[in-house]
Image (cartoon, rainbow, N blue to C red):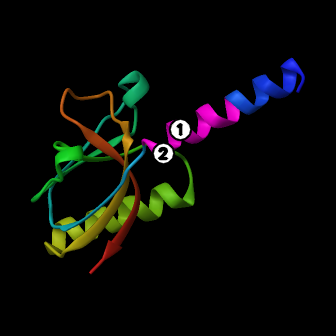
Amino acid sequence: MSNISKTLLSLAFLACSTSALAERIYVTTTIDALYTYSEQGVFDGDVAIKISNTPAACEGGFWLRSANTAGYKNTTSFLLSAYHAKTKVTLSGLSNELWTGSTSKYCRLDQISLN
């Protein structure tokens, strides 16, 4: 096996090992508070989501990365409607993508369902 093949194999193994550390977190809860940040540099437009019952891996709650996409707009719309209606939602996120805007662990939100 050539050195290049060994290097590529090692990198592939490392990538698989790192992604294995990511835990998908699901929680059904209500939203207690929403925070957003404008003109805050790296946090510009991020949304922090405080929830009623936080999983240990996401002790602060969840966060949504700002983006000018339909997905961001739809997700913020779901968050706002669930917050105002005090309706239960199921949130899903990744425990290895923590928000740097807080010392508490906020997991990156990647899916929301209204229940």
Front one among 12 and 102: 12
Extreme-front residue of the structure:
1
Residue on which the image places disc 2: 20
- Placement of 4 over or under 36, stated as above or below: above
* Location of residue 70 in the rendering, given as x and y in whole percent from the top left corner: 55, 60
Quadrant the C terminus occupies: bottom left
Q: Residue at x 59, y 41 (%)?
A: 16
Q: How many circles with numbers are drawn on the protein?
A: 2
Q: Secondary structure at mark 2?
A: helix
Q: Secondary structure at mark 1?
A: helix
Front one among 10 and 40: 10
- Please tell me whether the stretch drawn in magenta is mainly helix, strand or loop: helix
Quadrant the N terminus occupies: top right
Front one among 21 and 99: 21
Apparent side of residue 91 relative to residue 10 in the rendered image (left or right): left
Q: What's under tag 2, amino acid-wise?
A: Ala
Apparent side of residue 29 relative to residue 68 in the rendered image (left or right): left
Task: Find out whether residue 17 is within the magenta segment.
Answer: yes
Q: Residue at x 17, y 76 (%)?
A: 87
Instruction: Find the magenta span and give its range.
Output: 11-21
Apparent side of residue 54 relative to residue 89 in the rendered image (left or right): left
Write down the quadrant of residue 48 in the picture. top left
Apparent side of residue 35 relative to residue 39 in the rendered image (left or right): left
